[in-house]
Image (cartoon, rainbow, N blue to C red):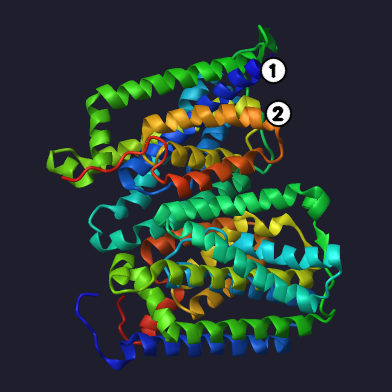
């Protein structure tokens, strides 16, 4: 944008507020889904799409808000799920400890990985997180005596009721949204944006870049870990397939299609992509072709994603 | 004399790795981005070779050439449609260049895998061999004809590429653009054309590597993942963008893996390659033979 626009509607805080309200509206809409959806199978689909929405929010915190392109969100979901599953399998730890342990474990792991890799930037960061993700998957899949390898582990469930699970996932989603909103409104969020836009400039103004990047990394990993852990208790089976690169690809496509650097975009993207992929399964499994093509087209021609397009239209600007 | 057998076979695999990695290193050299769809160039090469020779009945040696052409064409297309905005007339994009490149090439990789999966089918094909021989041994080293021929072709290609880069005018233009795009264009080099050429060479080498290995590894749609990851390791190990470093690192990795698989653990072989990558990035990010860009 060439000219500076100082109208109130365009200030970052106001845009964030609008974005947050819109995301809550989407969640509210989802609350009424049980009125339309009745079969347990469809509930399963909705729950998985909220799982992906959580991963997308976690990845977006890193990529969209802090400008760090990690390729490990699915790996951290897998690690979170395995933390809960292994605690149950070896020590018979109840889920009330197992799930917080997953959050804590992935946060610490993310913090450590962050300390190590975040001095690197751009392609180096992507390469390192990609190799971390693959190492994690290979190690989990091959430590057969400890994790039962590719057979996976059985996990106890919180409750059998799918509607209950649906609302639990929605509550976690709202909690994550509120947390992200508060953080983005605060100093920390401003620092993240500053680092995303110009890391050298941010550092020269006295921002501890590595520290704030590590914080974002750790938090993002914790969100992914929590999502993975909950998903494990829902599906009652945890396997290394959770950490496949294809899953990371899905998460990235959700965020890019929905709109990077926003709160509503990742949720809308996750819902759209996952529900559409279930729908397209009837047409012979073309969903990944459509989404990967969509990702390329969005990245090439519509960089703000669907939500960026929608909010621009709402501001009455017409042409992007 | 297991060790000698491992050494020779490791070196042969190192040659295949080098074919892949050199192209990736060249792309990083001129554009400073990682092509996450590089493994799919390899996969397309393998498929082109197998399908052309099996379905159309064209002799394997000609199919090999056609597969190489397919790879070069794909490379040209990718550069023309997806990579050009990185440097041509989109000044404001330079900030988000890395992000764009990661997202687009990652998306392209998924697209190609799923397209092939859908159109050709998820089942792997075994390619026809270039030369019909049974296994034979030279001293303690066990080999078969296809492996030997493929290694020979790779070696010739690598030597040819080295001469091309070092001696020819185009090769020197590539070196110049890799060192400094602006400086090169000030000296009258067409940087756009050079970049296009680098993508074609890169696609050609990766596709040839896939085609040469097709009779040994049954290419399936996701066959590119591991060679691609290996080439990331190699490119980092040899110094991002350094062609000579990449070749040396590829041979090293091939030998290292062969020994590691036998003496330590076969299952963790791939994980340790990646561990090397992380360690190198942490301790010596410029790699073993890293070269810094030059300022004008």
Q: Tell me the number on the disc at residue B2.
A: 1
Q: Given the image, what chain letter belongs to the residue carrying mark 1?
A: B
Q: Tell me the number on the disc at residue B262.
A: 2
Looking at marks 2 and 1 on the same chain, the residue that comes earlier in the sequence is marked by 1
Q: Return the residue nearer the eye: A94 or A20.
A: A94
Q: Is residue B124 above or below residue A74?
A: above
Q: Residue at x 59, y 74 (%)?
A: A53
Q: Return the residue nearer the eye: A290 or A305.
A: A305
Q: Residues within 10 Å of mark 2 (few under 14, many from 20)?
A: few
Q: Given the image, what chain letter belongs to the residue carrying mark 2?
A: B
Quarter of the image where one finds residue B120: top right
Q: Residue furthest left?
A: B187
Q: Return the residue nearer the eye: B182 or B116.
A: B182
Q: Quadrant of the N terminus of chain A?
A: bottom left
Q: Report how many numbered discs are placed on residues in the image.
A: 2
Q: Is residue B71 left or right of residue A78?
A: left
Q: Residues within 10 Å of mark 1 (few under 14, many from 20)?
A: few
Q: Residue at x 38, y 43 (%)?
A: B286
Can the viewer see residue A199? yes
Q: Is residue B197 above or below residue B149?
A: below
Q: Residue furthest top?
A: B139
Residue B295 location (% of width, % of height): 19, 45
Label 2, label 1: how far apart the Cα atoms are = 10 Å
Residue A214 location (% of width, % of height): 49, 68
Q: Is residue B128 left or right of residue B150?
A: right
Quarter of the image where one finds residue A161: bottom right
Quarter of the image where one finds residue A274: bottom right
Residue A157 location (% of width, % of height): 83, 74
Q: Is residue A170 left or right of residue B182?
A: right
Marks 2/1 in contact by CB < 8 Å: the verdict is: yes
Are discs 2 and 1 both within one chain?
yes
Residue A59 location (% of width, % of height): 53, 68
């Amino acid at each position: 944008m060439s000219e500076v626009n100082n109208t109130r509607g365009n200030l970052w805080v106001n845009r964030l507020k609008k974005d947050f309200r819109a995301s809550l509206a989407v969640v509210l809409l989802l609350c009424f889904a049980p009125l339309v959806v009745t079969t347990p199978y469809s509930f399963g689909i909705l729950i998985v799409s909220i799982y992906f929405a959580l991963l997308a929010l976690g990845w977006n915190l890193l990529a969209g808000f802090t400008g760090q392109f990690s390729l490990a969100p699915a790996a951290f979901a897998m690690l979170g799920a395995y933390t809960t599953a292994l605690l149950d399998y070896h020590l018979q730890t109840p889920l009330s400890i197992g799930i917080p342990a997953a959050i804590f474990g992935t946060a610490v792991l993310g913090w450590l990985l962050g300390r190590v890799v975040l001095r690197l930037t751009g392609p180096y960061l992507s390469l390192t997180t990609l190799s971390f993700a693959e190492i994690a998957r290979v190690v989990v899949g091959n430590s057969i005596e400890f994790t039962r390898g590719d057979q996976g582990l059985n996990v106890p469930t919180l409750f059998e009721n799918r509607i209950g699970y649906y609302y639990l996932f929605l509550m976690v989603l709202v909690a994550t949204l509120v947390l992200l909103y508060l953080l983005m409104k605060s100093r920390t969020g401003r620092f993240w944006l500053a680092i995303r836009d110009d890391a050298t400039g941010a550092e020269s103004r006295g921002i501890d870049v590595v520290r704030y990047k590590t914080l974002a990394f750790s938090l993002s990993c914790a969100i992914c870990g929590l999502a993975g852990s909950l998903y494990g208790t829902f599906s009652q089976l945890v396997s290394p397939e959770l950490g496949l690169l294809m899953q990371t690809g899905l998460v990235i496509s959700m965020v890019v299609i929905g709109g990077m650097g926003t709160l509503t975009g990742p949720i809308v993207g996750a819902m759209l992509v996952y529900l559409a992929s279930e729908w397209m399964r009837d047409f012979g499994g073309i969903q990944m072709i459509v989404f990967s093509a969509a990702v390329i087209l969005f990245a090439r021609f519509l960089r703000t994603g669907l939500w960026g397009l929608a909010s621009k239209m709402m501001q009455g600007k017409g042409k992007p | 004399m297991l060790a000698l057998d491992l050494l020779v076979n490791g070196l042969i695999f190192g040659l295949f790795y080098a074919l892949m990695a050199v192209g990736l290193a060249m792309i990083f050299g001129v554009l400073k981005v990682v092509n996450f769809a590089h493994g799919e160039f390899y996969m397309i090469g393998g498929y082109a070779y197998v399908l052309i020779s099996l379905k159309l009945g064209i002799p394997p040696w000609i199919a090999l050439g056609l597969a190489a052409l397919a790879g070069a064409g794909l490379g040209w297309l990718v550069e023309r449609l997806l990579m050009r905005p990185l440097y041509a007339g989109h000044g404001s994009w330079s900030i988000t260049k890395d992000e764009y490149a990661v997202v687009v090439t990652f998306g392209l990789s998924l697209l190609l895998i799923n397209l092939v999966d859908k159109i050709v089918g998820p089942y792997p094909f075994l390619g026809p061999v270039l030369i019909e021989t049974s296994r034979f041994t030279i001293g303690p080293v066990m080999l078969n004809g296809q492996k030997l021929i493929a290694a020979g072709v790779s070696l010739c290609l690598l030597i040819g590429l080295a001469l091309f880069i070092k001696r020819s005018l185009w090769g020197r233009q590539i070196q110049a653009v890799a060192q400094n795009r602006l400086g090169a264009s000030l000296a009258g080099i067409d940087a756009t054309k050079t970049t296009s050429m680098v993508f074609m060479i890169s696609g050609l080498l990766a596709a040839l590597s896939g085609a040469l290995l097709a009779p040994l590894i049954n290419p399936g749609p996701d066959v590119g993942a591991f060679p691609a990851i290996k080439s990331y390791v190699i490119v980092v190990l040899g110094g991002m963008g350094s062609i000579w470093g990449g070749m040396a690192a590829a041979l090293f990795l091939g030998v290292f893996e062969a020994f590691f698989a036998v003496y330590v653990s076969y299952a963790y072989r791939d994980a340790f390659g990646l561990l090397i990558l992380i360690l190198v990035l942490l301790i010596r990010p410029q790699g073993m033979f890293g070269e810094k860009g030059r300022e004008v």
